Amino acid sequence: MAIEWYPGHMVAARKEAALAMRKTDVVIEVLDARVPRSSKNPVFEQLRKLNQRAALKILNKSDMADPERTRLWLAHYNAQPGVKAVALSAKKPNEVKRIPEYAKALAPHRNSALKPLRMMILGIPNVGKSTLMNTLLRRSVTKVGDEPAVTKMQHRHELGTGMWLTDTPGMMWPGIGEDIGLKLAATHSIGKNAYDVAEVATALGAYLLVHYRACLEQRFGEIPADCTGYTLLGVVASRRGFVARGGVPDLERTARSFLGEFRDGSLGRITLETPEDEDEDDAAAPPPAESADAALPDASEAPDGDEHPDE
Ligand code: GDP
């Protein structure tokens, strides 16, 4: 299943965000800890690396992710130059309030009102960016919703003396691969009209049968040894009594319910990928290039153009 979900407003937003990166010291990238590889926007990752901006990678929703796999992901990212990774829950103020301190450590030379620390926050839809911003700014500045792409404009906020934070809307990229598309549909980062719910639930079921069978059995009872992602839906339908007209399993309703249980954490703390999956992507193909946004000047050399006190 090819998923193409790149709404028009994201094209303009991507260009704006690429410009904002010129005046950024630290890129705060919000990832979904259940799919750190799939929730990374490869266009911005490439742009950030080309322009040598430091990254603070936030593995959000870690309360729903597999703690052992989160540990592997943190080690994977923290081994990369100019990168600091932390796992947290955007809903927990005590965890979120440390973000400025982590960002400061990545750009220690930007430490005054004259040379403010300039951060920008990026994330694909539904990773919890609005929740994080609200917790960070301790006021309701962005609309939090469980439908992708609620925020549609870039905003800049002062985050204490000498710290600026530019907020960007959730952005996807064109040409999402099949495996990544299915995972992003499962975690609800892709609009529901862009995918087939039974196909996504089948792919999720197939993965869970291999990697989290115990979670499935705890939730649905014993699962037949020869069960596949598709037949799992039939098992769940019969256990839940989801029957359509004519007495056949209501697979559509089952798929929706199954995805809902994964999304709200009822199936347990689950992560759908490991750092090896990301290494395989990197070995297979370079991330997509966007020549129009190619190397930007160094942050300190960026031309004037807005009201930052040091520019
Ligand atoms: P955005 O599209 O990236 O701005 O995402 P939102 O902030 O609107 O959050 C999307 C959904 O994820 C909402 O239902 C939030 O309540 C939920 N959410 C955000 N952060 C967390 C988290 O750390 N843990 C859990 N369990 N849910 C979260």
Image (tube, rainbow, N blue to C red):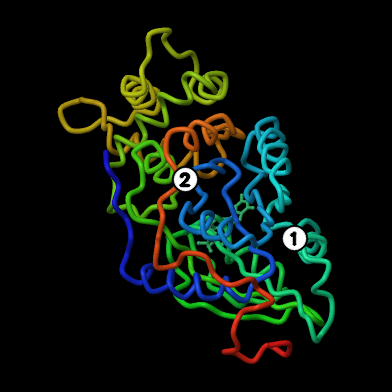
Query: Residue at position x 54%, y 54% from top?
Result: 45
Q: Secondary structure at mark 2?
A: loop
Q: Earlier in the sequence, mark 2 or mark 1?
A: 1
Q: Nearer the viewer, residue 138 or 74?
A: 74
Q: Secondary structure at mark 1?
A: helix
Q: Which residue is denoted by mark 1 in the rendering?
A: 96
Q: Nearer the viewer, residue 45 or 272?
A: 45
Q: Residues within 10 Å of mark 1 (few under 14, many from 20)?
A: many
In this picture, residue 110 sits left or right of residue 307: right
Q: Which amino acid type is shown beneath numbered disc 1?
A: Val
> In this view, which residue lies farthest toward the top?
225
Quadrant where the C terminus sits is: bottom right
Q: Which amino acid type is shown beneath numbered disc 2?
A: Thr
Q: Nearer the viewer, residue 77 or 10?
A: 77
| Position of residue 67 measured from the top left corner of the image (x, y, whole percent) | 69, 34
| Position of residue 172 measured from the top left corner of the image (x, y, whole percent) | 41, 58
Q: Residues within 10 Å of mark 2 (few under 14, many from 20)?
A: many
In this picture, residue 144 sits left or right of residue 133: left
Where on the picture, by quarter, is residue 164?
bottom right
Q: Is residue 128 above or below residue 140?
A: above
Q: Which residue is denoted by mark 2 in the rendering?
A: 187
Quadrant where the N terminus sits is: top left
CA separation, marks 2 and 1?
22 Å
| Position of residue 25 measured from the top left corner of the image (x, y, whole percent) | 69, 69
